[in-house]
Amino acid sequence: MVNFDLVLRNGTCATTSDTFQADIGIKGGRIAAIGESLPGGAREIDATGKLILPGGVDSHCHLAQETVDGVQCADDFESGTRSAAFGGTTTVMPFAMQQPGKTLGETVAAYHALAGPKAIIDYGFHLILRDPNPQVLGQELPTMIEQGITSFKVYMTYDTFKLDDYELLTVLSAARSLGAMMMVHAENDDIIHWLSEKLTVGGHRAPKYHAIAHARIAESEATRRAIDLASLTDTPMLIVHVSDEAATNAIRSAQTAGLKIFGETCPQYLFLTADDLDRDGMEGAKYCCSPPPRDTAGQEAIWRGLKNGTFQVFSSDHAPYRFDQTGKLRYGPNASFTELANGVPGLELRLPLLFSEGVNTGRLTVNEFVALAATNAAKLYGLHPRKGTIAVGADADLAIWDPDKKVTVQYETMIHDNVGFTPYEGRQLTGWPETVLSRGRIVIEDATLCATPGSGVFLDCAKPDSAIPSGRLHPEANPAENGGARLI
Ligand code: DUC
Ligand code: ZN
Ligand code: ZN
């Protein structure tokens, strides 16, 4: 008897709390049943020996966006979502960046037009707010929230983006009353400016000076200040792309004090260091992102933060620029570090890197991996339980992983973005998402893309406050190591 459109047989399923052997029956794009010996499906996939995990939710990436540097991203919604899908991700949340002279409604309409015909997997949007004037906060933002865009990013640095403390307080207060999630790029602009000037005047222009100008103190000071401002207004807030120990500790101690402060980190802070910016010639430009990669002690602090729950979200911050005059080297082959486009690609390798170096080394359980890869972001941004979990009624967004597959990263033969290089070239990984489903459709199978551009849909995000992790104590927390409570 055929009951389902598709049945995944005998896989080992994992959620944030459980790991269990089951069949998954899929009907109408959703998970219709989870059980033993389910009836037949029109199609069946034998997942014996494989892991079935929720498709990844990458809640921080830049697609078809002109970025803070005025450079156009190398990836549009087609190449970006294709690359994400090959890496086991089934939901992306890129940014709709407020354009001077345009309303938020006009801004978002432009991104819908870019995404709709091209996206291969489902997507939601965050806004980037650069001019939070009363009209924007009082009229336009509430309308965006009604339209399913319930989170936004603000910057504490970059000339035409940075908000001062007064503006941050004003925006926090609006986020609080609207129930929106504010994401903050926390770096102290004056410190970066001052150091950049001293370095440049001294003739220090090479990419490696980017990591010196974007000092750790610039990040930790801004992180602490943002937390203090959020505490003053009693507003939940997420610090994006945390790179180092001091900022991690600031978030941790805010959480221990009971504040609803959330943290995000990214692969570049686990797998790259500032030494990568000191590679021969201009090669270092490929590794230039903000905040910059730090050192091995910083990497260990980030791993600890992933393990002990300081970070809820592990995103790529995929900021795609080619290593040529259209991207990284837009000011020519001898550009100063201040002129390099900021950002590294990571949509495709985000999860394979974390799985290989987290789960397969024993640093993370597979359940912690699922939380960081998918579930927490879905909760924080109002997409759960439709996305980010394996449950009856949820969208059948699933990745079937071969946990033992060995892969050597090689951009030319295996990466599907439009960047032209990967910072992780040559890295040996164990574990790979072989088959990827989005709403029950097979998107990736046998290393082949099976879905067409335009088949992804826009996701209407609920207000995040109902789903924000509550900060309850986690039974596995080790107080000695963790300094107290664990969120989620
Ligand atoms: N911030 C981001 O989130 N991405 C790329 C560069 C930056 O400064
Ligand atoms: Zn940023
Ligand atoms: Zn970013």
Image (cartoon, rainbow, N blue to C red):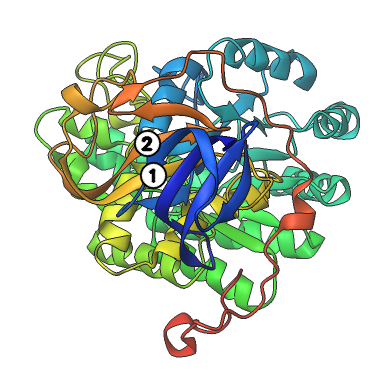
Instruction: Give the structural element (helix, strand or loop) at label 2.
Output: strand
Seen at 50% across and 84% down, the residue is 483
Q: Amino acid at mark 2?
A: Thr
Seen at 66% across and 72% down, the residue is 471
User: Residue 24: x, y in percent?
Assistant: 52, 48
Res 318 visible? no
Disc 2 or 1, which lies upstream in sequence?
1
Instruction: Give the structural element (helix, strand or loop) at label 1.
Output: strand
- Count of number-bearing discs: 2
User: Residue 62: x, y in percent?
Assistant: 49, 28
Q: Nearer the viewer, residue 78 or 241?
A: 78
Do the CB atoms of the residues marked 2 and 1 lie less than 8 Å apart?
Answer: yes
Density class for disc 1 (Cα within 10 Å; few <14, some 14-19, many ≥20) is many
The vertical placement of 76 against 91, above or below, is above
Q: 48 left or right of 263? A: left
Q: Residue furthest bottom?
A: 480
The vertical placement of 244 against 447, above or below, is below
Q: Which mark is residue 400?
A: 1
User: Residue 208: x, y in percent?
Assistant: 22, 40
**Viewport quadrant of the C terminus:** bottom right
Q: Which mark is residue 435?
A: 2
Residue 360 figure quarter: bottom left
Q: Residue furthest front?
A: 1
